Structures are given as structure tokens and as C-alpha cells.
Image (cartoon, rainbow, N blue to C red):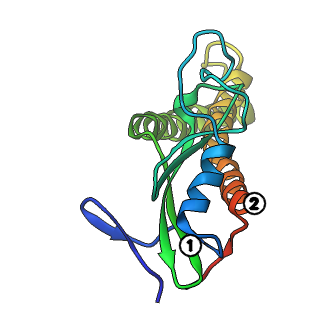
Amino acid sequence: MQRELTTGRETRRPELLLRTTLPVSDCAHRLRGAVDEPRWVLFSLSGYAGTKAVIGTVEATEVRLQRRSRLRHPWEAVFLHARLVPDDSGTRIEGRFRRRRSTVIVMGLWTTFAIVIGGILFVSSVIELVASSGRGPGNPWVGVVVPLIFWVVAASYFWRGRRERLFLRAFVGETVGAKPSNV
């Protein structure tokens, strides 16, 4: 039976479940040495001080990590919130991936806008292109291209999140020598 995480109001299964033979203190020490502490600086492409690929805080049994990004705002990051749990043969790492709530709300509204308004604009422009009535002002190709750009921006947000999850999962696994666990 898979152990579940308790996060405030509800109980959920962990999205990340790794097992290592190292004790909890060694796991925390290795992770702490492999990440930069999140300290804001003015003149940095990522917005944080340091050069390591991962930014985060590591306490005795709690871990909060994010991938350093030099090309986009740090508020768009995916965070890994994990616990280091002592196990019979070492340590079990249980965690969940999260984004900032404000970013999720804004991108949800953007995606809804892109689908609804972009869909209406796209369909009306395609109808104008197929059966040109001459009633529509301007170039109907703009109504085809602009919704496609909206949809690509919305899709890229979700695609980047998937890549960051895979990166953080591999980073934690390699840093502490952990393997996926299904129990």
C-alpha cells in the first residue's frame, strides 16, 4: 500500500517516491550541498544568487526545490516539496510538485481566454477565408495566426512544467543515489 501525504485539508498520494540506502541526515546533507539557497539579487538572469542548477531550502526532514531558470521569471517555477522519511533500509523521499497559486490562477485564466476567444476568432476567420463575403474588415489570416500563438503560449506553460518535474526528479535521484519506489 502506497503511503499518502497529508497536506493541510486533504490526503494525497506523493507524486515523487524514491528510496535510498542513505540515512536521513546524509540525504539532507547531500541535497543541501547540491543546491543554492534562495537569495534574491538584482543583477542576475535568474533573479537568485549562485550558479547551481537547483535553488532551494533543505531542513532536517523537509525539502523545497526549484530549477534555476535564466530565461523566464522565477515565479513560473515548479517547486518540489518533499519529506525525508526514515525507512528500514535507509530513507524514503516523498514529495509533490507545485506551482505558485497566483501563477496557476493567471495561467488558468489565460488558457480559458485563449481557448474561448481564440476559438471564436479562429472559426470566424476560417469561415471568412473559405466563404469570403467581404464583410470582415482587415486580413482574415490575422484571425487564424493570433489564436495559434495564444494556444502555443498556453501549451508551452504546461510543457515546461513537465520538463521541470522530470529534471527535479532526476536531480534528487542522482544526488542521493535514490531509485523509484512503488511501495
- Residue 39 x/y as whole percent: 53, 24
Q: Is residue 24 left or right of residue 19?
A: left
Q: Quadrant of the C terminus?
A: bottom right
Question: Which residue sits at x=60%, y=19%?
Answer: 135
**Quadrant in the picture for residue 42:** top right
161, above or below 126, in the image = below
Q: Amino acid at mark 2?
A: Glu
Count how many numbered circles sit on residues in the image: 2
> Marks 1 and 2, Cα distance to the nearest angstrom?
14 Å
- Residue 10 x/y as whole percent: 28, 66
Work out whether residue 178 or residue 88 is closer to the camera in this orientation and state it. Answer: 88
Q: Which residue is mark 2?
A: 174
**Quadrant in the picture for residue 13:** bottom left
**Quadrant in the picture for residue 70:** top right
Mark 2 residue crowding within 10 angstroms, few (<14) / some (14–19) / many (20+): few
Q: Report the mark closest to the observer, 1 or 2.
A: 1
Q: Is residue 156 left or right of residue 112?
A: right
Q: Are marks 1 and 2 in contact (CB under 8 Å)?
A: no
Q: Which mark is residue 91?
A: 1
Q: Is residue 20 left or right of residue 88?
A: right
- Residue 153 x/y as whole percent: 64, 34
> Which of pointers 1 and 2 lies earlier in the amino acid sequence?
1
Q: Amino acid at mark 1?
A: Thr
Tell me the SS state at disc 2: helix
Mark 1 residue crowding within 10 angstroms, few (<14) / some (14–19) / many (20+): many
